[in-house]
Amino acid sequence: MMQYITIEDGSDFREISKVMTEHGYTMNHATARNVLLGALKKIATNILGVYNISVTEENISGLLKSQQFQDSIVDLLYLANLETVREN
Protein backbone atom coordinates (compact mmCIF):
# COMPACT_ATOMS: atom_id res chain seq x y z
CA MET A 1 0.00 0.00 0.00
CA MET A 2 1.07 3.59 -0.50
CA GLN A 3 3.35 4.86 2.23
CA TYR A 4 4.04 8.42 1.15
CA ILE A 5 2.09 10.63 -1.20
CA THR A 6 2.97 14.11 -2.36
CA ILE A 7 0.52 16.13 -4.38
CA GLU A 8 1.81 17.90 -7.50
CA ASP A 9 2.17 21.22 -5.69
CA GLY A 10 4.31 19.57 -3.00
CA SER A 11 1.58 19.07 -0.39
CA ASP A 12 1.91 16.07 1.87
CA PHE A 13 -0.65 14.63 4.30
CA ARG A 14 0.29 17.14 6.99
CA GLU A 15 -0.36 20.06 4.65
CA ILE A 16 -3.58 18.47 3.38
CA SER A 17 -4.84 17.96 6.94
CA LYS A 18 -4.00 21.59 7.78
CA VAL A 19 -6.01 22.86 4.78
CA MET A 20 -8.93 20.55 5.57
CA THR A 21 -8.95 21.71 9.20
CA GLU A 22 -8.93 25.34 8.07
CA HIS A 23 -12.00 24.56 5.95
CA GLY A 24 -13.92 23.04 8.87
CA TYR A 25 -12.98 19.36 8.52
CA THR A 26 -10.77 18.79 11.56
CA MET A 27 -8.22 16.06 10.92
CA ASN A 28 -4.63 15.12 11.45
CA HIS A 29 -2.22 13.74 8.84
CA ALA A 30 -3.11 10.11 9.61
CA THR A 31 -6.80 10.84 9.08
CA ALA A 32 -6.05 12.60 5.79
CA ARG A 33 -4.09 9.53 4.65
CA ASN A 34 -6.82 7.13 5.74
CA VAL A 35 -9.56 9.15 4.01
CA LEU A 36 -7.59 9.24 0.76
CA LEU A 37 -6.66 5.56 0.84
CA GLY A 38 -10.24 4.58 1.72
CA ALA A 39 -11.58 6.60 -1.22
CA LEU A 40 -9.01 5.11 -3.59
CA LYS A 41 -9.96 1.60 -2.41
CA LYS A 42 -13.62 2.31 -3.17
CA ILE A 43 -12.72 3.56 -6.64
CA ALA A 44 -10.50 0.53 -7.28
CA THR A 45 -13.24 -1.83 -6.06
CA ASN A 46 -15.77 -0.24 -8.42
CA ILE A 47 -13.35 -0.45 -11.37
CA LEU A 48 -12.72 -4.14 -10.71
CA GLY A 49 -16.47 -4.74 -10.52
CA VAL A 50 -17.13 -2.96 -13.83
CA TYR A 51 -14.65 -5.27 -15.53
CA ASN A 52 -15.94 -8.37 -13.70
CA ILE A 53 -12.57 -8.91 -12.03
CA SER A 54 -12.66 -10.67 -8.68
CA VAL A 55 -12.67 -8.07 -5.89
CA THR A 56 -9.97 -9.39 -3.57
CA GLU A 57 -7.51 -7.52 -1.37
CA GLU A 58 -4.74 -8.70 -3.69
CA ASN A 59 -6.48 -7.34 -6.79
CA ILE A 60 -7.38 -4.05 -5.08
CA SER A 61 -3.80 -3.64 -3.84
CA GLY A 62 -2.44 -4.46 -7.30
CA LEU A 63 -4.65 -1.84 -8.92
CA LEU A 64 -3.74 0.80 -6.32
CA LYS A 65 -0.04 0.18 -6.98
CA SER A 66 -0.51 0.34 -10.74
CA GLN A 67 1.19 3.35 -12.29
CA GLN A 68 -1.57 3.45 -14.91
CA PHE A 69 -4.24 3.73 -12.17
CA GLN A 70 -2.27 6.41 -10.34
CA ASP A 71 -1.73 8.38 -13.55
CA SER A 72 -5.44 8.12 -14.44
CA ILE A 73 -7.03 8.99 -11.09
CA VAL A 74 -7.26 12.73 -11.84
CA ASP A 75 -9.01 12.02 -15.14
CA LEU A 76 -11.36 9.53 -13.45
CA LEU A 77 -12.34 12.05 -10.78
CA TYR A 78 -12.81 14.81 -13.36
CA LEU A 79 -15.12 12.62 -15.46
CA ALA A 80 -17.05 11.50 -12.38
CA ASN A 81 -17.55 15.14 -11.41
CA LEU A 82 -18.78 16.01 -14.91
CA GLU A 83 -21.27 13.15 -14.74
CA THR A 84 -22.52 14.29 -11.33
CA VAL A 85 -22.95 17.87 -12.54
CA ARG A 86 -24.79 16.69 -15.66
CA GLU A 87 -27.15 14.50 -13.58
CA ASN A 88 -27.99 17.39 -11.27
Image (cartoon, rainbow, N blue to C red):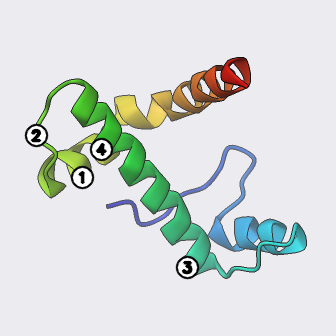
Find out whether the residues at labels 2 and 4 contact each other: C-beta distance under 8 Å: no
Question: Residue 45, which numbered label?
Answer: 4
The numbered mark, 1 or 4, whose residue comes first in the sequence reads 4
- Secondary structure beneath label 3: helix
Seen from this angle, which residue lies furthest front? 88
Taking the image as shown, residue 25 lies to the left or right of residue 43, namely right
Which of disc 3 and disc 4 is earlier in sequence?
A: 3
- Front residue (pair 3, 81): 81
Dot label at residue 17? none
In the rendered view of the protein, which quadrant contains the C terminus?
Answer: top right
Where is residue 42 shown, x and y percent of the image? 39, 49
| 1 and 3 marks in contact (CB < 8 Å) | no
Task: Sort mark 3 into few (<14), some (14-19) or many (20+) by Cα contacts within 10 Å.
Answer: few
Task: Answer with left or right where residue 5 lies relative to residue 22.
Answer: left
Contact between labelled residues 3 and 4, with CB atoms less than 8 Å apart: no
Residue wearing tag 2: 54
Q: Amino acid at mark 1?
A: Ser
Of badges 4 and 3, nearer the viewer stands: 4
Residue 80: x and y in percent read 58, 27
Secondary structure of residue under mark 2: loop
- Which residue lies under the disc numbered 3? 30
> Does residue 3 lie above or below 87 as drawn?
below
Compare marks 1 and 3 and give the one earlier in the sequence. 3
Residues at marks 1 and 3, CA–CA distance in whole angstroms:
19 Å
In which quadrant of the rendered image does the N terminus lie? bottom left
Specify which label sits upstream in the sequence, 2 or 4: 4
Which tag, 2 or 1, sits closer to the chain's start?
2
Which residue is depicted at the point 58% across and 32% down?
77
Q: Position of residue 84 (x, y in %)?
A: 65, 27
